[in-house]
Amino acid sequence: MSTQKQKQTEESSEETAIETETSSHQQRRLDEKAARKADREAQRQAAEESLDDEETVKLKVFRFDPEVPEKEEPRFDTFVVPFHKGMTVLDALIYARDHYDSSLTFRHSCQQAICGSDALFVNGRQRLGCKTQLADLDGPVRIEPLPHAEVVKDLVVDMEHFYDQMEAVEPFFDADELPDDELEEQRQDRQNREKIKMSTRCIWCGACMSSCNIAAGDNEYLGPAAINKAYRFAMDEREGEDRKEERMRIVEQEHGVWRCQTQFSCTEVCPKDIPLTEHIQELKREAVKNNLKFW
Amino acid sequence: MSQRYNRGAVEDFGRWREFSAGMWAWIFHKFTGWVLVGYLFTHIAVLSTATSGAAAYTGTIRTLESLLIVRLLEVGLLAVAVFHILNGVRLLFVDLGVGLTSQDRSFYASLILTGAITVASVPTFLAGAV
């Protein structure tokens, strides 16, 4: 850490020295930079032209970088990428980044719909880049960052708020009573497992939260993913009644389940096919059952 | 998850073409609900003419019913009310957790039924006016 700081100060002092000395160095560097840029552009054009007899896909990718003055204004870049059978949106983005523009920024990791890092807005819908086949899309494929989230750069959005909401529902197994023997299994019966099966599949990609226009207007709303998480544990019979009551107290608040207006947007876009609206509705009924008494 | 600057095409209003069934159902339900609230006021206004005598009320109704535009608005009102009722029933089922997987089909069904009832009502509403 300390060495880094030192380096930085050294660099900045160097820069000021150069600036005060003369601008010729800077001019030379800028010229070189412009030449490199022209070279890259020529290479890119040549690469794109060489694809003429191949099957290609046209991508229109959202670009934005608040740290570079020229890129502050959001714009769309077009990339022509060679198509191969089984190619996904993420594959195409990776190709564009590796061959055309190394500054193209997007999150990806496992590339098999498990890590949940590449939820994107593709052709007007929240989808996982690695799970969306290009063959299923009409071209040109428009790729944008998730709506209703702050863009950090290009296709990367700030997920902090989403993670806050997820953590608000205490997304961890926490049984009332633990077995006497520490190593003993905590078994769940098959029916109960089946009941929560779909809700356990959430990969925290944030597609549902981005598609929900209630969550877009109400920052306090837990959102579909967090409520689904709450469902997963509240419905788990191993946790016991007391813990379930605590969990219900979190979701049955005004900005919990009751903000859902059953637009089914989240259920529609969920890449893991979790019936989110169904789970939210079940928690609503559960909340009513707990609070409505006729005696 | 609000954001602080204009993202151009991402936030474009033209995106309504990409809405799915559940979203349309929500929008139509809100719209018809507001129309019905608005109608409630005119309804009360017309009925309240009866407080100044039976003749005043009959006169008001006769004048209104002689106007073609009122007849057309009545057809529209029926369409709005029928859709709101049918979609309301759909939402009751959604709240009960019944048939959530066919929520889009039940929306289309309520649309078609609304259309059919509206068309069937046209002769009754426009009788003598055209």
Image (tube, rainbow, N blue to C red):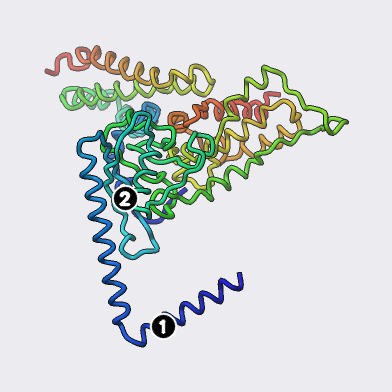
Which mark is on residue A16? 1
Q: At which x and y percent is residue B23? A: 38, 31
Q: Mark 2 packing: few (<14 Cα in 10 Å), some, or many (20+)? A: many
Instruction: Report the front residue among B119 and A156.
Output: A156
Asked whether residue B112 appears in the rendered view, the answer is: yes
Foreground: A12 or B83? Answer: A12
Camera-near label (1 vs 2) is 2
Residue A271 location (% of width, % of height): 47, 31
Q: Position of residue B102 (x, y in %)?
A: 43, 18
Q: Tag 2, which chain?
A: A
User: Where on the picture, by quarter, is residue B67?
Assistant: top left
Closer to the camera in the image, A53 or A226 = A53
The answer to whether residue A241 is left or right of residue A8 is: right
Depicted A125 relative to depicted B96: above or below: below
Label 2 sits on what residue type? Tyr
Horizontally, residue B109 falls left or right of residue A115, namely: left
Residue shown at 61%/37% (left/top)? A251
Residue placed furthest toward the bottom: A21
The residue shown at (29%, 53%) is A75
Please name the residue that numbered disc 2 is placed on: A100
Q: Earlier in the sequence, mark 1 or mark 2?
A: 1
Question: Mark 1 is on which residue type?
Answer: Thr
